[in-house]
Image (spheres, grey):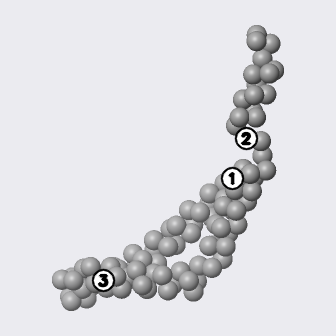
Amino acid sequence: MEGVKARSIVLYTVLRLLAFLVPFGLLMLIPLFREYYWLAAIFAALIGLSLSVLFLRRPLADVTSDLAQRRAERQTGTTDEEIEDAAIDDDPER
């Protein structure tokens, strides 16, 4: 099950990067933006943000649900201190 969680995070990250890099590459083909590359980066960031809001809702929901599930598992599980105390109490040499 961990592979599915990591896969959704990697997929979302790659799609977000592509949502920025593809518009940035296309804008760099325009001579004006070659001179003002920082302006191309700003426009590409805005385009990438817009694309991710419109088309990446499901991958974002998968990632956030996976992160929420991990956080819930950590909070309901035993703490490190409890595990260490149990290991010390069960140690026959002590």
Q: Using a 10 Å C-alpha cutoff, classify the residue at mark 1 as few (fewer than 14 neighbours), some (14 to 19) or many (20 or more).
A: few
> Looking at the picture, how far across and down is residue 11, in whole percent?
57, 66
Q: Residue at x 43, y 85 (%)?
A: 47
Callout 3 amino acid: Ala
Q: Name the residue beneath numbered marker 3.
A: 40
User: Is residue 1 shown to the viewer in this render?
Assistant: no
Q: CA distance from mark 3 to mark 1?
A: 38 Å
Q: Is residue 69 visible?
A: yes
Which structural element holds mark 2? loop
| Image vertical order of residue 52 relative to residue 89, above or below | below
Residue assigned mark 2: 79
Residue 78 percent coordinates (x, y): 77, 42
The residue under the point 24% across, 85% down is 33
- Could you tell whether 27 is left or right of 91 in the image? left
Say which amino acid is labelled 1.
Glu
Q: Which residue is mark 1?
A: 2
User: Is residue 69 positioned above or below 53 on the image?
Assistant: above
Taking the image as shown, residue 23 lies to the left or right of residue 10, namely left
Q: Nearer the viewer, residue 85 or 73?
A: 85
Ranked by sequence position, the earlier of labels 3 and 1 is: 1
Contact between marks 2 and 3 (CB within 8 A): the answer is no
| Residue at the (21%, 83%) spot, across then down | 36
Residue 18: percent from left, percent from top = 45, 74
Specify the amino acid type for callout 2: Thr
Direction left: furthest residue: 35
Image quadrant assignment for residue 70: bottom right
Quadrant location, the N terminus: bottom right
- Tag nearer the camera, 2 or 3: 2
